[in-house]
Image: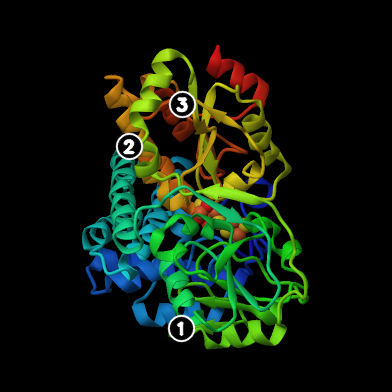
Amino acid sequence: MDKMFCMQCEQTAGGKACTDVGVCGKSADTAALQDKLTGALITASRIGAVVSDELLIDGLFATLTNVNFDNNALSALIAKVGLPHYDMYEVRDADEDTRSLKTLLLLGVRGVAAYAYHSRVLGYDVSAICAFIRKALSAIGEPEWGLNELLPLVMECGKVNLDALALLDRANTETFGTPEPTTVERTVESGPFIVISGHDLRDLKLLLEQTEGKGVNIYTHGEMLPAHGYPELKKYAHLKGNFGTAWQNQQREFADVPCAFLFTTNCLMPPKPSYSDRVFTTAVVDYPDLVHIADKNFAPVVAKAIELGGYAEPQSGGTFTTGFGHNAILANADAIVDAVKSGAIKHFFLIGGCDGAKSGRNYFTEFAEQTPPDSVILTLACGKYRFNGIDFGTVAGLPRLLDMGQCNDAYGAITVALALAEAFNCGVNDLPLSLVISWYEQKAVSILLTLLHLGIKNILLGPTLPAFVSPNVLNYLVEHFGIAPVSTPEADLKKILG
Ligand code: FSO
Ligand code: SF4
């Protein structure tokens, strides 16, 4: 008998399911607790038990890939829900289309919950989003429901995720200002420093406040890179730059580095002994034996950074640029429209999504490299690290590569696409725009559902298609939306550009 069953991310074992131990490092007993937690939230939704929005969101976020590996923390969440759990094996053992749609819905609402989390901690009302999450969880527990009942809910999940992304865009800009194009240093200066990873801008702000004037520099990691574009964050002189590359390289890039690391959300990998003494977690992230900061008093992180002392000499690196959110791009809307009309810009590519460890992900580097010089590359999320070190030059006075932000900022890309469609008086699918999306975990699932809800067609998805999509569900997606797996950069570019 299988020790566990998890197929929720792109690196799932054998492209099917992790059944012994997670490729991500999740153990079978942790997987069982995550199932129990999900099952208890399903029970709560089915019987209408009072579970606060906070607990609902935290509980779902804790089950995302690379977030919570700590059995005590998961058991505490289960105890807080305090209800018997729906058996998640009912989903696994359902017919393959029901299982596929229920899994799509569950992973979709996990992604929605992650986005709602950031808005909630900034004080925004997420009750309408949570109402849908409860409806979706309840549907997952419906024994008789199949394709006809579940498909509309899967599509509705995409709509609700759009609402969640729009709310987060508002929450971030109202709290931290409108992102502006910014050059980010990759040189690490001498002296004590902290590297902060994950997506939570509020945690970064709190850390910046608590370290101001303490002689400790702050560097962002992974998905925290776009934070440098926000006026209310970049104003801190000790927010120095960005460290390392995408999440899957952390075990190599963190080894023996003389600083403290703070993880605010995914993607945490099991820390290696060479640096595990200096990794801290906060919020929904947890890992056995690491110090967890529950009260947002980051003094232990600061103390560790001072103890380690940082580098004696600066470690030189290049630069990245970020901060091309929808406001920054649309400030140039007239120039962009003119450039398209004159033929100076012939095509837009959105190449983004999550990064991951598989070698097939070189596709996204090669694809970006092979895009023609009269095209613009919009990017977002950690997949950008596959090519954001490359100088793509400029087109029509704009940088060819525009980093729109985190995966959380997918709303910005949607806003730009809709604005261009309006300017050209056409539909989004008629624009010279192609979406080439890399996926890894459940936030990407919710974004994909949002793109489908908007009727966006011909998305190229890679590096592989999700294991939880059954042949019938895939046929539906191909027939209605023209979704296709990536092939080779050469063939895909030829198909797109004709
Ligand atoms: Fe990446 Fe990880 Fe942002 Fe994900 S750091 S993979 S989709 O958690 O959330 O893009
Ligand atoms: Fe496997 Fe991904 Fe689940 Fe981890 S999250 S156990 S790698 S499918």
Residue drawn at 49 percent across, 58 percent down: 228
- Callout in the foreground (3, 2): 2
Badge 3 local density, few (<14 within 10 Å), some, or many (20+)? some
Quarter of the rendering containing residue 98? top left
Give whichever of 313, 124 is nearer the camera.
Answer: 313
Looking at the image, residue 396 lies above or below residue 466: above
Q: Earlier in the sequence, mark 1 or mark 3?
A: 1
Q: Residue 338 placed where, x, y %?
A: 38, 20
Rendered location of residue 141, percent (x, y): 34, 58
Circle 1 SS class: loop
Q: Which residue is mark 2?
A: 453
Quote the CA–CA distance across marks 1 and 3: 45 Å
Residue beneath the point at 38% across and 49% down: 105
Residue holding disc 1: 294
- Helix or strand or loop: what does disc 3 sit on? helix
Give the camera-side residue of 68 and 8: 68
Q: What is the CA distance from the residue labelled 3 to the residue labelled 2?
A: 14 Å
Where is residue 449? Give x, y as percent. 39, 41
Position of the N terminus, as image quadrant, is bottom right
Neighbour tally class for label 1: few under 14, some 14-19, many 20 plus, Cα within 10 Å: few
Q: Is the C-beta separation of discs 2 and 1 under 8 Å?
A: no
- For residue 34, above or below residue 89: below
Query: Is the image coloured rainbow, by chain, by secondary structure, or in one colour?
Result: rainbow
